[in-house]
Image (cartoon, rainbow, N blue to C red):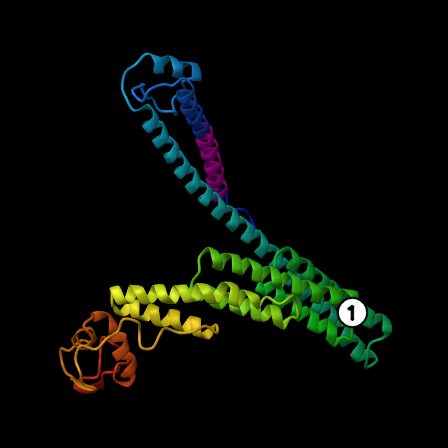
Amino acid sequence: MAVDPEAKVFAEDIRREMQNLEGLLKRALQQLALADQYGLPDSTPYFSFSSAASMEEFLARARSGGQSGLRPQLRSDIALARLKLRDLKRQADRLAAGERATLVKRDYDALLAADVNGDRRAQAIIDRAAGARGGLTEAELAQVQGLMLGSLRAHTAFMTAHPSRKAVTGTLGRLARVQALGMGDTDIATGAIKGAQGAQRRIVDQTRAQFLKKPTPTGAKVLIDEIAVNDLLGGESAMSYVNRDILPNLGKMMLDAERRFRNTPTKANCEAMFNAEMACVSAGGEGLPDPPKGLRRIKQGKKRRFGPGDMLSAVSKEYYGNFGYWDVIYKANWAAFHDPDRPTPDTTIEIPY
């Protein structure tokens, strides 16, 4: 797979701009240090560190007097340069990740192509033997086994270098073929099993790091799935991550989602709260308090006619004194409110608690 020439040029431009900014940033920090070293007041004239002035020229201009704002301007330039550098680094990282992904995909595609060729050769040996003698000779069996073991070795090496669910699944698929040929106790097969366990544990650790960096219900589900696969493969258990990392973060997300909904009781915020609670319960945690904290009745009555023009939030305000508890009524009357924006008209609803 050829490297995109435009992407290569773009990457070079980014690298060049980063080098320039790093030089300018270093220069600005030196100027600021000189200003402090010589006790220059803020009334010292300022000129941008991007100019070609030397340190000596900087001091000469500084001592000559003039416009004010030396330190504030230098600090502003430094902050701006750091922001630009951070943005450029993100761009460079994204480009590098894209290049790595392209190379990894190319290598994996080549591995799969080699599998196809090897499988064809093995099948041809089997077919010839079946037509000629009805079975494989020891030499022919050794050929077939060699092809399968070679494929498994290549998959194990790729998986170890680039651990991913696809790579682990591919290795286990080749391992199953090797085991079917009676070679499950070979060193290569044993190495594949250990390699799959190690690769999956690395996947778990990478997924955990991503989840801790930006916890989301979806990220929690992915991490739980990877932990389940890890333990299924018999590797070092990672179930401790559930109680240590996943449940506390899911609980916090759930409470944050509830707080957002109570303050701004929109349909979107209600769905986000429900999803966060479902994720927490699915992972083995506790759901939201039932009834919600802070809910209090200001009007009695267990039932109410819900007619045209009525809104759940208005009913919540009527009975609980707050618009932000309409989810309670919604959950108690689920059959009548498949969509809270489109309730079944002229329905008698229950008012819980």
Between 109 and 251, the one lying in front of the other is 251
The image shows residue 13, relative to residue 248, as above or below, that is above
At which x and y percent is residue 91? 45, 44
Q: Is residue 12 visible?
A: yes
User: Is 15 covered by the magenta stretch?
Assistant: yes
User: What is the crowding at mark 1: few (fewer than 14 residues within 10 Å), some, or many (at least 20)?
Assistant: some
The image shows residue 107, relative to residue 258, as above or below, that is above
At which x and y percent is residue 129? 80, 76
Residue at 46 percent across and 42 percent down: it is 89
Label 1 sits on a secondary structure element that is helix
User: Is 197 covered by the magenta stretch?
Assistant: no
Query: Going by the image, does 126 lie left or right of 73?
Result: right
Residue indicated by mark 1 = 145
Q: Is residue 113 visible?
A: no
Query: Going by the image, does 230 lie left or right of 268?
Result: right
Write down the quadrant of residue 316 in the picture: bottom left
At which x and y percent is residue 136? 82, 76
Query: Going by the image, does 3 lie left or right of 297?
Result: right
In the rendered image, which quarter contains the C terminus? Answer: bottom left
Range shown magenta: 6-23
